[in-house]
Amino acid sequence: MDDKLFLMIPGPTPIPERALLAMAKAPVGHRSSEFARIMAEVSDNLRWLHQTRSDVLILASSGTGALEAAIVNACSPGDRVLVGANGKFGERWVEVARAFGLKPEVISAPYGQPLPTDAFQAALAADTDKAIKAVIVTHSETSTGVLNDLGTIAGYIRAHGEAVSIVDAVTSLGAANVPVDEWGLDFVGSGSQKAYMIPPGLAFLAVSERGWQAVERSRSPRYYFDLRGYRKALKKNNTPFTTPVNLVYALQVTLQMLKAEGLEGLFARHTRLRDGTRAAIRALGLGLFAPDDTFASTAITAVIPPPDIPCDKLRATLKKNYDIVIAGGQGEMEGQIVRLGHLGFVSERDVLTAIAALEGALHTLGYDGFTPGSGVAAASAVLFG
Amino acid sequence: MDDKLFLMIPGPTPIPERALLAMAKAPVGHRSSEFARIMAEVSDNLRWLHQTRSDVLILASSGTGALEAAIVNACSPGDRVLVGANGKFGERWVEVARAFGLKPEVISAPYGQPLPTDAFQAALAADTDKAIKAVIVTHSETSTGVLNDLGTIAGYIRAHGEAVSIVDAVTSLGAANVPVDEWGLDFVGSGSQKAYMIPPGLAFLAVSERGWQAVERSRSPRYYFDLRGYRKALKKNNTPFTTPVNLVYALQVTLQMLKAEGLEGLFARHTRLRDGTRAAIRALGLGLFAPDDTFASTAITAVIPPPDIPCDKLRATLKKNYDIVIAGGQGEMEGQIVRLGHLGFVSERDVLTAIAALEGALHTLGYDGFTPGSGVAAASAVLFG
């Protein structure tokens, strides 16, 4: 049915109607006092969401831009950096580090498995010369559905004392607990089209006081992503280059919604959505690509379909018959998994609907390894107790 | 009156209602076939607007991001580049060049005066070793209202044979004739909140075949702005990182509107708006900061108020009494000039209204150096013939 598509991909995520309508307002000037008032409110609420008293910068870019900004502002050519890589995004940060002349040392894990925290501990403890300048960690690895143990790794980084932490929180910020100040995180990047519940086009970067010291030391070339300009502008509730005003209108609205739900409510909802989804996937006899519940993303669940059901057919059937869009695998995971996003403006009802549709699609495609209704029942038991 | 503000600043510019409403649509996935169809249409129309058969890339950034992308992709550290600077934006590109280790040689002119084309000719002719790798020219200098003679300078760059041209067309593309292929321009950057008639958040960069050869040669570090990824993605009607889907929805609509008006109509309208504005400013006895009509921007007119009328008071009066927002001077021009934007979704009626309001504001502030109605009459004679 036209205009009936419902996105359950890991971004863009569904947008509340009031945020869509907020965007459909004539922009004011990005240097006006009216806009500064909006930016002041938005900045306060971003600090609340990040659980930080430091700065949260707004960039006109995708989330990748925010991570590149962190990397070039924290490090200089030749710097040793540790990078965790257990999926496509972790690997991307290795590429960015190399592109800017850093020397990345990769701590990896197989796709679907969490990063080995002990390897970070060992590498940082062995670095008695304090040559490691940054540690880059992807919190929720969007390509596999793994939630890495950022809290533990952050402790090792703090113990090292020299290296700053650079965190890809693109699909965790707002969908999982990321207590920036408590964990002493230095650079935390995220993107608007995720748990922020607005369309793509804005990125966010929280920077700690220690982070700012690294920014001052960096010798990497930068201009558009030179964070010093963003900090200066932030003091005037502004950005150094033109702000995407209409996206900020939407953000103002959704941050108010998130605040009304509260951090506990927000994280509990995403945890419920994840747990309900995983219970259903298990009840249907399908595989969970991230098998360990402790390290399962609250933003996205990667599912291994039955052997006889191609991923693209499953996705096409869900789209054609139910107007539900789920994602496929990225890169080498294409054809191996499908990914069901449940972050942002997603309710228990949406997950239940998706599971019901998944049951129908599996049936249509000839899979009979489950009792009809068992996925819905399992999800329902978790979601609605 | 609430919600009555009308922007006559050089960006954001007014947005047609249908573009605002197009943004208020739930986003589809940026990797979906539905979105690829929209991107295909948008790309075709961008090529039409740029008068080119080459690629026009879409970036999630401000216009500054597009210019930085051009500079880092066209040049390598140590490269000699010529940069024209007769305003804040020209000076910005000198800063960007320095930030990335290039050796900029500045060809300047006083604010309000056009760049001396003969200086470009002489510098390029003297460079028999072909050491100059790029020439950076701001077409419409938004900070002063000067339209530099890009066509002539482009001819000298072509004659040089080695240097590529990098053009800041942020407020000229769509408001003035920029025949990219005919002038052999290699990198042409612009931004969505100008003549494109949509909110800020997208930037555009046209790249010629010669430009692409420079991109392949460049040794500058880059990732988010690595144009090779954008070119590869464009072939699939996509972008390498997440596209601001809703801004593209709006762009699809406004490009259709621009196409319906036609290039000739578009340029003629902007020329009329400029000429009408300038006639009125003269009739009111005020100063034109860019005095030479031949080199006056079709996007913005910088006005020198009467000596006794402070710029901020004039702007505040226009805003308070008439809900019309005009811009002040930037940097060292603050307090010296006001800038009246007339690009994008601006009609003859809007300019007439602005002049009528300006007359009223001047009267309120005690300026009596004009016959009431003379500005409106002068504008009207030009605008409506």
Image (tube, coloured by chain):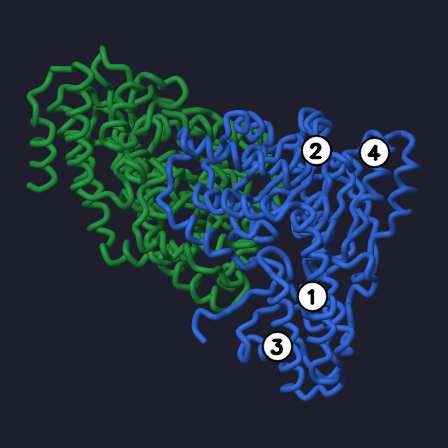
Chain colours: A green, B blue
Dot 4 falls on a residue whose secondary structure is helix
Numbered circle sitting on residue B60: none
Dot 3 falls on a residue whose secondary structure is helix
Q: Earlier in the sequence, mark 1 or mark 4?
A: 4
Q: CA distance from mark 1 to mark 2?
A: 45 Å
The residue labelled by disc 3 is B357
Q: Are marks 4 and 2 in contact (CB under 8 Å)?
A: no
Dot 2 falls on a residue whose secondary structure is helix
Mark in the foreground, 1 or 4: 1
Q: CA distance from mark 3 to mark 4?
A: 46 Å
Asked if residue A287 lies left or right of residue B355, the reply is: left
To the question of a shared chain for discs 4 and 2, the answer is yes
Q: How far from the left and from the top, in percent, is residue A245?
A: 48, 56
The residue labelled by disc 2 is B74
Residue at image x 58%, y 34%? B44
Residue at image x 20%, y 35%? A274
Q: CA distance from mark 3 to mark 1?
A: 18 Å
Q: Earlier in the sequence, mark 4 or mark 2?
A: 2
Residue at image x 63%, y 38%? B48
